[in-house]
Amino acid sequence: MNGWIVVAIVAIVLLAGMVVLASTRRRGADAAVGALARETVARDKKARRAAEVSPGPTDVGVSSRAIERAAVLERHGGPIERVAPGVVEPFVPPSPETIGVTRRSFFNRAAVALMVFANATFGAAIVAFLWPQGGGGFGSKIRVGKVSDVKAEIQANNGFLYKPEGRMWVTEYPASALPKAEQVYSEPELAGMREGLLALFQKCPHLGCRVPECVTSQWFECPCHGSQYNQAGEKKGGPAPRGMDRFAMEVSGDEFIVDTGSVINGPPIGTNTTGQEAEGPNCISAGAEAHV
């Protein structure tokens, strides 16, 4: 019960406050006489002084307070105090710079700007995606390095040099095997082999596994199904249908270049231009079951 009394008291207080606030605002609106700016007061004094010096029938100084009092009397139904008109300044429309930008035009321009920016960003991303790459990635021509430097890297890595950006193995090809190679391989392959280098695709032609090197046998030996290849990628054993695929190569000046966008099928089974046999234990024993 006490709770209801408290709620009723609070409601009465709130209603009384609202009534007082409404009446106060009404009286303020009826009076409509507020403090005048300093510039307005100075202008009224100047107009009164001008009227005292040379009064005219229509050029009489009138204060702003007199105009406001006349308006108040008229609203309350009292006698209307006639106020002689003062000097009326001609209306000068504001310039576009003074008006500035409206809120609606600001939001419209902002929306258009954001739309243009989004479209430009999306277009740039599409162009960058479709633009052909300048090189260095798989599917393009890769500058591996100078022939002498590449050979030095191969020797420093126990006869095998892997280039992940081209998904390729680079090995040395012996000059003594070139006469046989010229009867088997195409010109894009021979261009590198004549300089003593060979670029092989890392993928096994059997089922596509990545073929690692075997340092002990100095062969490539696939861990998936035991296919084996010599350093020239020629098949030595296992279920692979051919030798390792290789890339087209070229030498520009002293620069060894591999075209990873041009994959050439590996040599057929039975190709053995180098005569290289296993130089030590095989890493994959399954591949040693049958040599071709």
Image (cartoon, helix red, strand yellow):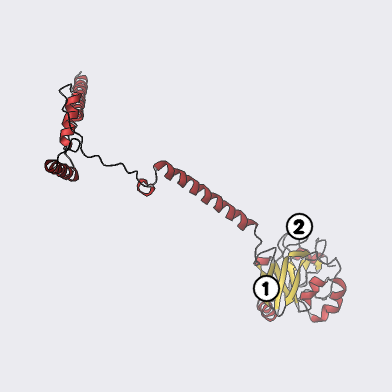
Q: Residue 235: x and y, percent?
A: 81, 67
Quadrant in which the N terminus is drawn = top left
Q: How crowded is the residue under tag 1: few (<14 C-alpha within 10 Å), some, or many (20+)?
A: some
Please say if 51 is above or below 71: below
Q: Percent position (x, y) of residue 247?
A: 75, 67
Residue at screen point 86% across, 79% down: 179
Tell me if residue 190 can be seen.
yes
Name the amino acid, label 1. Answer: Val
Q: Which residue is mark 2?
A: 207
Which percent across, then down, holds residue 234? 80, 69
Residues at marks 1 and 2, CA–CA distance in whole angstroms: 27 Å
Position of 149 compared to 174: left or right?
left
Q: Residue at x 69, y 65 (%)?
A: 140
Residue 250 coordinates in the image, percent (x, y): 75, 74
Residue 224 located left or right of residue 21: right
Closest to the camera, between mark 1 and mark 2, is 1
Residue at image mark 1 = 144
Q: Is residue 151 left or right of residue 19?
A: right
- Under circle 1, the secondary element is strand
Q: Which residue is located at x 88 percent, y 74 percent?
A: 183
Residue 4 location, quadrant = top left
